Image: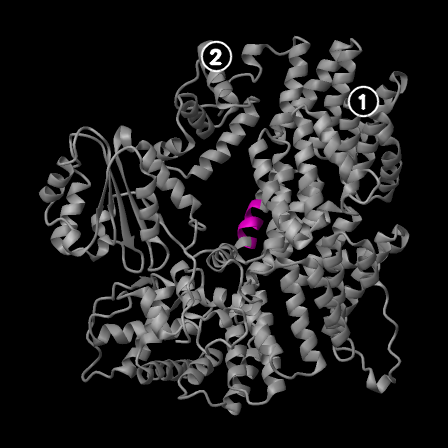
Amino acid sequence: MTGETTVRTAVRIHGRSAQQDAVRALLHGLPARGGHLVVTGEPGLGRTTLLQWAARSFRAGPVLRLGPGPDAPATAEHLLDILREVPGPAPVLVCADDAHLWDTPALIALSRATRRLRPAGPTGVLLAVAGHRAADPDFAHLPAVRLDPLSPLVAADLLDDLTDGAVAPAVRERLLAEAEGNPALLHALVRRLSPAELRGHLPLPGTLADAATLAEVAGDAPAGRCGDARDLLLTVAAAVRATDGPDADAGLVLDAVRRLRPEPGPGPRPAPLPEQLALAGDRLRFHGALVRRAVLATAVPDRRRAAHRALADVLETGGDLLPALLHRSWSLAGPAPAPRLADRLAAAADGTVSAPYGLRATAYARAAELTADAATRAARYTAAAEQALLAGRPERARPLLTAARDTAAPAAVRGRAELVRGLTELRDGPVGDAHQSLLLAASLLAPDAPTAADTATLAAADAAWAAGDLPACLAALAPEPRSTLPAHLNPAPPRAAGHLAAAVREHRVGMRAMLEGRIDRAVAPLGQVVERGRTDDCPEGLLRSAAAALLLGDVDAARRGGARALAAARRLGSDALVPQALEYLAYAELRAGRHPQARTHAEEGLRTALRAGQRNTAAHHRAILALAASIEEEPDVVARHVTAALNTARRHGLAQVATLAEWATARADLGRGRPFDAADRLGLLVLPGPGRGHFAVWRLAVPCFVEAAVLAGRHEETREVLRDFAGWAAFGADPQAAAQLARCHALLAPPERADGLYRQALARHDEAGGDFERARTALLHGKWLRRRRRPREARGRLGTALAGFDRCGAGVWAAQARGELRALGALSDGADTGTLTRLTPQQLRIARHVAEGATNREVALTLAVSTRTVDYHLRKVFAALGVRSRLELARMVEQAEQAEPVEKTGARP
């Protein structure tokens, strides 16, 4: 212990919104019908905190708090007697904490009482049950919610809440890495440190999450009932340490236990599996990570080393060199360097390229710990950080980089460290800082590792691009002077490295030419990058291919490259690259006008980015989701994603994200018939001035601005930006631009020219594809025709627009088309969506329940699906029927079923 700090209690529950929603649903329905809910999770994840929050939130009646020991009722009748003592018919909430610790009679009483609640009034039972052990059959019949470890981003918010943000960056990284998302462990680690240690003025303890701290949080959960059970628990915990996952091979563990506890006779006695473990197929795992860590940390040191030695012996017999060397290294006594073992471990990590990134990171880090030479130690810590970043573990990479920086190292090693640091910040930090780190990396790497220097330079350009800094982007892409070294001192790189260097160089040259407006010089090198993507099998090369295709406007090639990059990243276990591949896929779908597909990729990309601790990448996905939702009748969804995206964009300087998010808000305004608001917002993005949007994005918003400005009577403001947009359309990088330009000219043209321009725009849409943009043009043309008293032609155009909007799920725009058709008398008020046969069977069931007044959560419980599934289908229902509220939906369901009865069990075949 190094002294304790008085730590603030967190003022809010972090990262538990889904679990709080489930508890709210129980509390909301309790006065009418009672209910039950089990909250489960391993120690430290907040079961008791959630029960306390529920007790504070319940206002409809009394709360009965029960716990293990003397607070537990002895019999079911005893519990029922307690409930009967509550006066009157008021609802009662029973909060039973740590029910897994209750003795058998109390458990039986509780289980029976959950089925026989008091007759006088409704009762709700909220149970907290440990998740580090097998599920208790007494509660298997009850609905449950599980508490999982916090994501890195949520854990960082909790740390700021606990410390008011007064933690040094390096200390922050260590704390988050050690806590592994466990709130109680994070709190204990912070409390353990002195203020000087938290601020980085004093060095941290060598082992931050030591045995005492882990034991404090885990309680008695790691305890085994006997010596055999303790050895099995210890061996599983030790085995998992040398894997890149939560489990270990059961055969390996049992062989190691036999060596650890040799039994006389034919073999060890069969024993029941300890409750802390689960067996799935041939894999053994703990129910929770904290208990596993506590088992390992609190074991007797000699016994722990013996377990690692036994595992090493078994693995060496089987030829598994890398994990065998890791276990051999952990079997050593004392912290003294072991240079020979360190060299073997690093060599095995170098040679086992098929090993998971996380395992290789562990091997390099352990080799660094055993290395005496400072420069070599720094190189190995840097290699460990590289692998951790590829594994999608930036919170693990940052402390490793700190360890590498604390030691002397040659320029090439420092350059590699800065490259990793810059890439980490590019995905999860201020992009201005990332830009500077990557430029420094390029300068340090240039003499000895030119290919890596080119990679750093291209990444620095990516950082400047994200920041919207065109001069910095061009400067980073500027050609470097050729080396003046003699040929024998500047040898040609190996073939593979030369292939990589050529691809990076071509991307760099083509990207600079594109940004300078010299498309004739950009097409060839970028085309080469795209072409290499047809045969490349590494995710980095495929991502470059997708990015080059987007620059050229070849959305099909971008989709192909992104899909292959995603498959390659998943195959290699590179969790860091999966969100980026999904980002390119989503952008390609968005550029092609396929908003539902873009939304699907962005939703998955957001989840993977948050899991990988990549706030910047998550912000990009949120901006895409906002744009996708802006064409649907979902203003709340747009606002939620825009708010989250802008929050990160402003803190980290993400100009591209900010521009996309503002555009999404404006497009939602335009779709909902608010052109003045849309024109005001879009004017800030596209009109000349210091507040203009991102240099590569603002032109994409020009067609929306022209439409909004014309509707708002601000024609003159469109002239200059439209000339610029004409140049962009001629550029050829956006397949929709030529058709959009003709549409913009039609909006501004006199009547004698407008009709021809609309028809020209529609013809170009037919060449480019994309339902949404074509439907928008058809809608504007149909409006124009209706106002010029050409109803037959208008009806055809508006019907085409409506079909296009329906096909791509653009509910808000479909409502405009229906309004125009209604004004023509071509769509009756009572059947403006046809009938409910437009819905799938699941959508129809959900629509009927909602029309009857059920909430989304109540529908989910009735249909035995998740709330997210109900939300998704309800969005589709609103889009298909063209309604804007639950009240409109109820009216439409009632009208449709009166006019055209539909079987209760079906819809469209």
Real-space CA distance between mark 1 and mark 2, rounded to the nearest whole angstrom: 39 Å
Position of 124 relative to 220 (above/below): above
Asked which colour scheme the image uses, the reply is one colour
**x 73%, y 73%: residue:** 497
Tell which circle, 1 or 2, labels the residue nearer the N-terminal end.
1
**x 31%, y 77%: residue:** 299
**Image quarter of the N terminus:** bottom left
Q: What segment is highlighted magenta in the picture?
A: 603-609
Task: Return the x and y of residue 62 as percentages of the image width and height.
Answer: 24, 37
Mark 2, Cα crowd under 10 Å, few <14 / some 14-19 / many 20+, is some
Q: Which residue is mark 2?
A: 895
Task: Return the x and y of residue 848 as percentages of the image width and height.
Answer: 42, 23
Task: Return the x and y of residue 670 as percentages of the image width and height.
Answer: 69, 28
Q: Which residue is mark 1?
A: 713
Q: Nearer the viewer, residue 24 or 883?
A: 24
Q: Amino acid at mark 2?
A: Gln
Left or right: where 248 falls relative to 254: right
Position of 382 relative to 393 (above/below): below
Which quadrant of the structure image shows residue 473?
Answer: bottom right
Left or right: where 742 falls relative to 66: right
